[in-house]
Amino acid sequence: MRHRTPLLFASCLAIAAVLLLWFRMPVPTGTPTPRPDTPALAAPAVVPGPAPRTHTPPTLALETAPAPDVGAFVVRVVGAQGPLEGARVRAYLRVADDGSGTSPWRLAGDGATTEGGVLHLPAGPGNYLLSAHAPGHGPARLEATRPQGEAETAVELRLASGVSLRGRTVAEGREEPIPLATLTLRPYPGTPTAWATATALPEEAAETTSDALGRFAFSHLAPGRYELTAEAPGFSRRTLRLLQVPQAGDVVVGLWGASTLEGFVVDARGQPVTDAEVTASGASSPVRTTTGEGGGFALEVNAGTWVVAARRGQQMGRVSGPVSVAPGETLRGLRVTLGAASGMAGTVSTLDGVPVPDAVLVATPSGGEGELGRATSKEHGAWRLDVPPGEYDVTVHAAGMTGRLLEGLVVEAGGHTPVDVRLEPATATLEGLVVNAEGQPVEGAQVRAEPRSLSGITHTVLTDAQGAWRLEGLEAGPTSVGARREGSQRWASRMETLKAAQVTHVDFTLADSGSVWGQVTRASGGALTEPALIHAVPRGGSGAASTETDAQGRFQLELPAGVYQLVALPHSTPAIYFHLESDPSVSVPEGGTVRQDLVLKEDAVLSGVVLEPSGVPSPLAIVAALQGGDFPMTRTERADETGRFSMPPRPQGASPLELVAHNAGRVGRLSGAHESQAPLTLRLEPAATLRGRVVAGNGAPPDGFLLELREANGEELPWAGAWPTTRRFPGSTFAMPDAPAQALKVTVRTDDGRTGEVQVSLRPGATSDVEIPLTGGVASIAGRAVWSRNGGPAAGVAVFLDKAVGPRPDALTGPDGRFRLSDVRPGAHTVRLLPPEGRVETRTVKVAEAEATDVGDVTVSPRRATPGTLGAGFSEDRGHVAFAWLTPDGPAARAGVHVGDRLVAVDGQVVRDSTEAEVRTRGAPGTPVRLHVRRAGGEEEVLVTRAE
């Protein structure tokens, strides 16, 4: 069976071994999967371009226009007939997210092109989105960088002829037209991958309204991918992602009825409260109303998860936990009890205690979305934020400082939780050298720093004649640092942890560039029906380059010299994956060009719909696919607004999976799921209510604790990371109205370090009460990973505690192979070790209270070669076949073959291309094969025994 592998980006490079196993590509949490297009309907006449947007404020302009001496973009706008004079060009600058809630983009300048289609647009260093508009053409948009140290940055924008998009808005399931729906098209300015985000700039969006028959049309669009959003009174919003424009037929957008939240607001005595403001906060804009005479309220909302709160004067309250409502569903019986003012208060200061004024603090539901309150620190750093009792996450932004995220802050009734925030100044510095493969300096290379902070700001600089570079005023914390040659599409990158007022030195060695081009066809041999995505992943390196084919399926990628695996995938595929031993590898030569044609992968996927207990779709439900066996692994995806989901592809003949769907405590499971059964249906069961108290056998009762829900065997719940499974409670009691109805292990840890656990079995819709006795303090687990082939220390091994292999390891082994898992509760635990390109090793460990347990040496092994193969892949390099990669400790590697060796013949037969090499080196497991190999030192014959 062929191996297929996915790829993970920089956030998961530490566990590169998963590259060889199933699927590895993060998708932004909460991003809906696009619904397949519905059948086309009759086309309406194309109406004029959409009228200017009136309800969305325009993008704010920079407070001070860029001066000419800061440098400029030299923008050239070209159409099909040549340069375009009079084209309007806008430049938007990405600024720091200051927590104010305004867009992080600012209009930095605009103007019209003159003779030759050229415009000089003053612009300082930073990241920009450039757009060009001209009558009779579709707009052109480009993400561009103005690096520090460059006077002028040349950019060309090519405008194509405008195209149209037609469609209808209908009631889902009934095909009845919905008139007066507002439809908005937002473009994807970069490569439109499944994890890309459409631009939210109002000037770059197109908007129209459906007519009396639900028909709509857009004109003067640029060909490409768009996000289409439809909204209408009485209906839930619907979003179609990665919509290709133009379409062969009409787009039919089905809308579900709006959802409704109904309930009452009462005071502490249970009496109804009139004129109270009720707010529902979620991923979209808050929805507000006022209670009537009997304290009742009704809120029309989009389907999804909401936090419902109420306020009257100084009194406030909120519904316990988030509430989830399905499309067209009315959720009744909500109750908000108002109490005395509560919230959080404290100061914002530097690490040295200097007050930080004008810091912005924003509260959201713990682990969720939707703003619930905000505050700004005063002159002496003091701040106060009034919010109802509950659990919150708080982001803190301040100019010139590194932002912070405070998680799981608990607010009790009638009081203000003290929260003092200490911020580090943005005074970190990066510097280094960029050289080529011969060690010579590379002048004019771009070097960038992307902090994993709240600001979202990337800094870029050019190297000087000595290849040196320096970036100052950076935020502290984990930062991705990358370098690339001028004009290159791929960055060489690594992660560094920056510290305030300290200099971090990072050097890069960049190979010269070449290019790969080719044609993509379908497996049937036919032409593509729409453009596809090409991904190039370096063998033995990190980072991937992606591009889109043209309408005819042609592509070209400029890449640093090296060996790459190539794959062509549809845009909606949420992972990059390969048939490892049969998909093409290609050697990109320095300064040269190589051709590699590809076949579009359109493999079957696990897909289906998640339904609520009532049978209606479950919006934005979390779906986890659990892979068991020797390589336990969990992959999660979010369903769209209509409950539809799709998993990344797997190899043909792969074993069935267990699917688990979760939405606000409601859970559904399906065993033995396979692609051949799609589309699947997962029906959720009602959540349970879990109440209890933490009991101290000795010592004082706890005044606060952290509670975590796990599987009955102690493993992490499948939806962990996508929905909170850990919550903090004040005092010694707790209530969870959204607990999953299943067998669980409930663990607690108090603020003073004591722990406790209890097993429970919850039933759908039922309430269970438990007592959790406290025992001693937390423990730790340590050990060392060593290689099976030589007993040496295995560095970079990912360590997972009580959970399947995934993108979030709990620890990584150091250069000495050692690891340590701290803050471990007493009891039995499962530890899994995953080496790069290797197999999972599992150990069961039992730890005692407040003890450090060492598991000793754990032997880890590289990935095994597929039986009957050499454990090698091949590429074509200027008429020669070369070894592109080797399985560590595989048959070819043990026989002395090296990456880059040329394969001349197999068992005396000359090989002319990589396909012949693949076919002739395969055979019965354990059989010998003679390889004629050429390398720098001459030619030799190598005898290899195929893998068993």
Image (cartoon, rainbow, N blue to C red):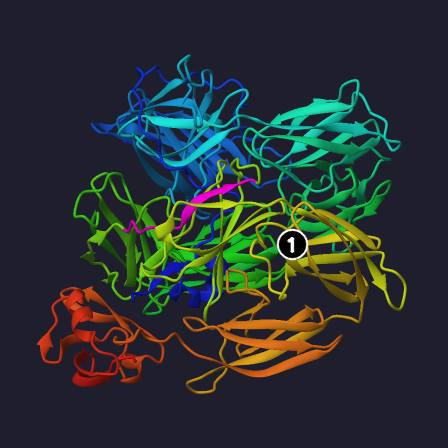
Secondary structure type for disc 1: loop
As drawn, 67 above or below 753: above
Q: Nearer the viewer, residue 526 or 898?
A: 526
- In the rendered structure, the answer to whether residue 568 lies left or right of residue 13 reads left
Please state if 248 lies on the left or on the right of 396 as rendered.
left
* In the displayed structure image, the side of residue 257 where residue 315 appears, left or right: right
Could you say which is closer to the camera, residue 624 or residue 588? 624
Q: Would residue 507 be seen by someone viewing this image from the given angle?
A: no
Residue 830 in view, yes or no: yes
Tell me what residue is drawn at x 77 percent, y 37 percent.
387
Q: Quadrant of the C terminus?
A: bottom left
| Identity, as a three-letter code, of the amino acid under mark 1 | Thr
Count of numbered tags: 1
In percent of width and height, residue 114 lies at 32, 25
Residue 608 within the segment the image draws in magenta: yes
The picture places residue 911, in percent across and down from the top left corner, at: 12, 71
Q: Which residue is mark 1?
A: 725
Q: Residue at x 79, y 67 (%)?
A: 754
Query: 112 and 292: which one is in front?
Result: 292
Residue 603 among those drawn in magenta: yes
Please give the range of residues in magenta. Answer: 601-612
Q: Label 1: how many residues lie within 10 Å, few (<14), some (14-19) or many (20+)?
A: some
Residue 567 on image: x %, y %: 29, 55
**Image point 77% across, 66% down: which residue?**
755
